[in-house]
Amino acid sequence: MVTQMLRAASDGDPQAAADLLPLVYSELRKLARARMAKTPPGNTLQPTALVHEAYLRLIGRDNPSWNSRGHFFAAAAQAMRQILVEQARRKFTLKRGGNRKRIPLDEVDPAIEPPPEDVLALNEGLTHLEKVDPRKGQIVMLRYFAGLTTEETAAALSVSAPTVEREWRFARAFLYTLLANPESHA
Amino acid sequence: MEAAKVKQAEQLFQIAIGLPASERDTLLAERCAGDAGLRALVDQLLAHDATGMGEFMQQPVFMPVPDRTGKNLDSGPESIGRYRITRTVGEGGMGIVYLAEQTEPVRRQVALKVIKPGMDTRQVIARFESERQALAMMNHPGIAKVFDAGVTEHGRPYFVMEHVSGVIITEFCNEHRFNVRQRLELFRQVCQAIQHAHQNGIIHRDIKPSNLLVGEDNGTPIPKVIDFGVAKAISQRLTDKTLFTQQGQFIGTPAYMSPEQAGGTGLDVDTRTDIYSLGALLYELLTDSPPFDVEKLRQSPFDEICRTIREEEPPKPSTRLSEIALAARTQATRPSAKGVPELARVLGMDHRSLVKQLRGDLDWITLKAMEKDRSRRYATASDLAADIQRYLNDEPVLASPPTAVYRFKKFIRRNRAVATGLAAVFVVLVAGTAFTTVFAIGQARARAEAEAARDEAERQAKIAQAVNDFLNNDLLTSVRPGRQGLDVTVREVLDRASEAVEGKFDGEPLVEASVRKTLGVTYTSLGEYDSAEQHLRTALDLHRASFGEHHTRVAASLRDLAELLYYKGDHQDAEALYREAVEIGRSLFGAEHPDVAEALNDLAALVHLRRDYETAENLFREALTIRRKVYGEEHPKVAESLHNLAGVLETLHERAAAESLYRQAMDMSRRLLGDEHPNVIYSQNNLARLLESGGDFQEAERLFRAALATRRKVLGDNHPEVAASLNNLANLLRKKGQYVEAESLASEGLQIRRAALAPSHLHIARSLRLLGQITLLRGRAAEAEKVLGECLDIRRQSLPQGHALLADTESLLGECMAKQTRFAEAEPLLISSYETLNDKLGPTHSRTMAALNRIVDLYASWGKAESAASWRARLPVSARDAHAPSGASGKSE
């Protein structure tokens, strides 16, 4: 079923792409929880590993073309981003002493330690970048949130690796600049 | 911030990061005039980019487990440079090797080798940088790529290489119980990898088992050579200082080190150093022991190690096996004694039949590769591989047991201090064994006979000189270019002379050699390379047979032949011959001699061709200094040196210095040699090219036309150098928009080159490119496509995949398709070739921008205005308005 959705998504069906996200999202959360229980202390999990494992579980090994794999990883990146942002928002509200309502245990997201970057600000900056230059947004999504390499990102977006490198370099400087001067968004 | 502003900022950002900081300001001041906000944004982007922004977004988001204790502490540093250390792989004499992860610009696993203290880090890095381009050219499955070098925070140099998982070749063979044939197969593959490196101008210098790792791919063993470029960077030549670190540790591997690396010969290492080490490797593969006793070497003082390597002959591999067998039997109680029984057991055979298998061909192949005198080794790694293949095919091998005379010569060389004359040789030898005495007396007689023969030869040389003078002065020189004069059809005279020379001089080798030399050199200057080669090779053989290896006549013959090979495009062989000629000259006359300068000069020209500009500049300067000392300030040879030096400086972008040197060279040559001398034309052409690239088309055209006229007059209409002049002029006219004349000149140049050069010669491709480009400009796209397709075929034959010249041709081909409205076919070709050019030459290179323009044109003609606009936006603002299709610059020659 997921494979079909992928095909539809890569054929340009936006609904299929949207349908994919929740599946990937819940799968990633499940996997992360399972991994955390098994992983010995001192080791870290890279999203790459998780995302690839989710991919295998959802799609299997019949290896659709990179184009549709690209859609999967885009969905995975979106899921990772969403998980991190939600967590950061919750922390933010907790810190402010806001919502202290107890959350049912099995709905707790895996305790993902936030990356060193300011997730909420980064999320905002990235949303801005996506508006002015969608491809750079995709590059950031795939590299940073899905952990793809330059080559994988290039293959997923059907551009060359040097292009990915070049645009990544700019995107990183751009986001850094936005984060350094939050008022410059407008 | 609106999208347009971000786009604009990105464009400026991408251009600026390719510029030196000093030029950025000018660019930004110009492009951001009146838009302070844009300027501020770009400045900030650049400033953040320059700092690296620390860890910001360097790692993808992590999903750590709750507990962050238990960090791995014993795995060395966490990171070196931009490489994250994963673990330690090994520790060797030279340093520590880590497995590391690279994240920028690509994510991959690499091996990182940190050199132990005791080196001059700055020099190590400088030497690596000098070879970096050539290293990057190497592309062979048998060679581990070297990516980078750098300096750790403790100031130690490190090298970053492709990570290879494999087992050291000797261990691999033993673990897998490889028989002799399987070992030879593997060894042959190693030779081929080394050959590839040599063809790219890279010498390994430290071939040994631990630098040869064998991995398996679906059960097929794949050997890989690691550490290319490392040995050179670490030490140019082994000396007392470089051989030992401060801790007294041996860095090199004495058992595989060539005699010239062990010093004393005063020779630089060349590709034949690697041939020697390959021989030593083969020795170990066949006997399970290195050619010299490693333990004994390690315990010896430095001088003794070098002496051993320079002078001691290792036993034949078969003899070594017998020795080990004997030792194993007599010391059977020593558990560590590892002998033939062990190797034979590994190979699953009786040790006697193993000895028998090695005796003869395999002994001689190994020892020929390991000859002390490198001119007697296999000339190339592929020659060595070919001899192995002959053995495997049961064909006769080229290697043969050394002759008695040769052995005697070697004896004399080893004992030069004692054996200063025949009498002394007698005294020494009589004290030896009975066998040696008999041998020596026989040799002494042979030597006396050789002396007599040499007297005779000298007598003949006088005759030869007479014959040659006749040929030189009265007949042939009239057609040598430079002396203006007779009709070039004197080639007929040459052809007749060539026929006459066969069999005419039997018994008078030196007369024949002189005649052939003259014929060969004259054919060379007429561009008749095949005929020339035949004569020059025979002349060289004859000179060698008469004078031995070390003689000024042999050196001269080598230079003649090398020059021909250079013109023919056989650069590697030419380089080896020049180096041999330099060595002979130095050993005969010392450093300051016209012959040495001559060979240095020619050698430099070749080194320049393979883009080692720094070395080329030094060699040219060395030749110039010698020539000024020997000839004085005003001399044709000094002019030649000035011209050549100008060429390197031009390549190094020192335009003003280059222009001044070209003019000096041109004027001096003209004063001394007359207006029509080829050297005047060379300087004139190069000066014109320099002026053309500086935009002075008018003066450039005048000079190119003058050069063409002179060449036609002196060389006739069918000479390759006339073709070069035609191309130069045609390209300039193309730039000026005079397409009709440009086309006719370019196609004439192509015809000449097709007739004179090998079908796959790159000069033919060059003519094809120019002609295709002009045809395209004249609107005949289908025809241009055919021409450029042929150009691409030729270039693909000799250039590696991803080479800028290939991409450049592909981009032009894409334009041809687009012009014929085959848009969908053109699109991927245009884009991929643009990416390659952008990658290899940078975004501001004229060929990159031309390729970008072609994409814009494609979309514009395709009716995809949006795509056209977005690609157009990548062009620098100034180039957008002035953009003309097919604006690629051509290169003159």
Image (tube, coloured by chain):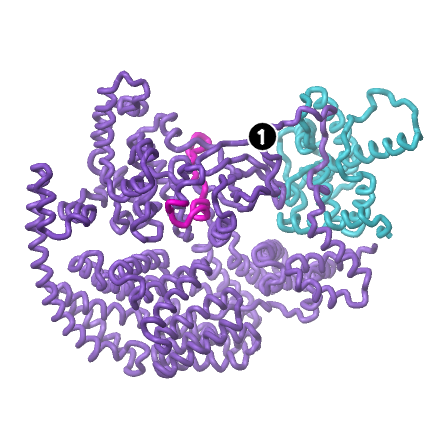
Q: Is residue B391 above or below residue B463?
A: above
Residue nearest the observer in this picture, B600 or B393: B600
Residue lying farthest to the top in this orientation: B333
Q: Amino acid at mark 1?
A: Ser
**Residue B223 painted magenta:** yes
Q: How many numbered marks appear?
A: 1
What segment is highlighted magenta in the picture? B213-241
Residue A10 visible in the current orientation: no
The chain letter of the purple chain reads B
The N terminus of chain A - image quarter: top right
Residue B413 inside the magenta-drawn segment? no
The answer to whether A166 appears left or right of B515 in the picture is right
Q: Is residue A110 left or right of residue B222?
A: right
Q: Chain of mark 1?
A: B
Tint applied to chain A in the drawing: cyan
* Horizontal arrangement in the rendering, residue B674 relative to residue B20 (left or right): left
Above or below residue A29? Residue B638 is below
